[in-house]
Amino acid sequence: MTDCVFCMIGTGEIPAALVYEDEHVVAFDDIAPQAPVHTLIIPRAHYADIADHVPADVLDAAMRAIPRVAELKGIAVTGYRVIINTGPDAAQTVHHFHVHVLGGRPMAEGMVSFDGSR
């Protein structure tokens, strides 16, 4: 997809300070972090979201990257949260499948918050 910022990062067209990479995925720090550590893992190829027929090998690569990113970012021992947003109700803002790895401070017990509009 030519206008997808994550595709451009995945191909190297837009430079990013990569935290991790392999043949299927790249990981880099979020530009609007929601925690002291907020790293995104994206496939190099474009998939709109996790329901977009993402091949098993790409999903596997993304899942295998999670503990590696946590280790590299220094949060593997203290813990981290993993989030995948899918669709408008989940507030997915970039329509390229991606995994958020968040940590670096204690988090609240509640998994999510809602905007109260419903």
Image (cartoon, helix red, strand yellow):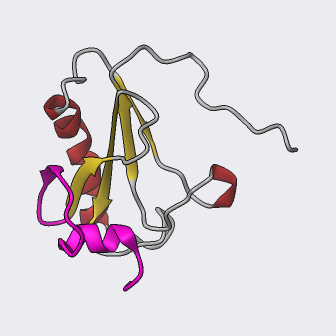
Picture quadrant where residue 12 is located: bottom left
Residue 28: horizontal and vertical position, in percent?
25, 50
Which portion, as a residue range, is magenta? 1-24
Number of numbered discs visible in the structure rendering: 0
- Residue that extends furthest to the right in the rendered view of this protein: 118
| Residue 3 image point, x, y percent | 41, 81
x and y, in percent, of residue 24 in the image: 19, 65
For the point 27% across and 53% down, the residue is 62
| Most foreground residue, 84 or 53 | 84
Q: In percent of the image, x 32 and y 20: which residue is there? A: 79
Quadrant of the rendered structure where residue 96 is?
bottom left
* Image position of 46 with respect to 79: above or below: below
* Image quarter hosting the C terminus: top right
Picture coordinates of residue 66 (x, y %)?
A: 26, 41
| Quarter of the image where the N terminus is located | bottom left
Residue shown at the point (31%, 59%) measured from the top left: 42
Q: Is residue 22 magenta?
A: yes
Left or right: where 71 falls relative to 62 = left
Q: From the viewer's perspective, is 78 left or right of 86?
A: left
Q: Is residue 118 above or below residue 72?
A: below
Instruction: Find residue 54 and report its image quarter.
Output: bottom left
- Rendered residue at 46%/34% (across/down): 34
Residue nearest the observer in this picture, 51 or 1: 1
Is 73 one of the magenta-colored residues?
no
Seen as rendered, the residue at the extreme bottom is 2
Vertical placement of residue 72 versus 14, above or below: above
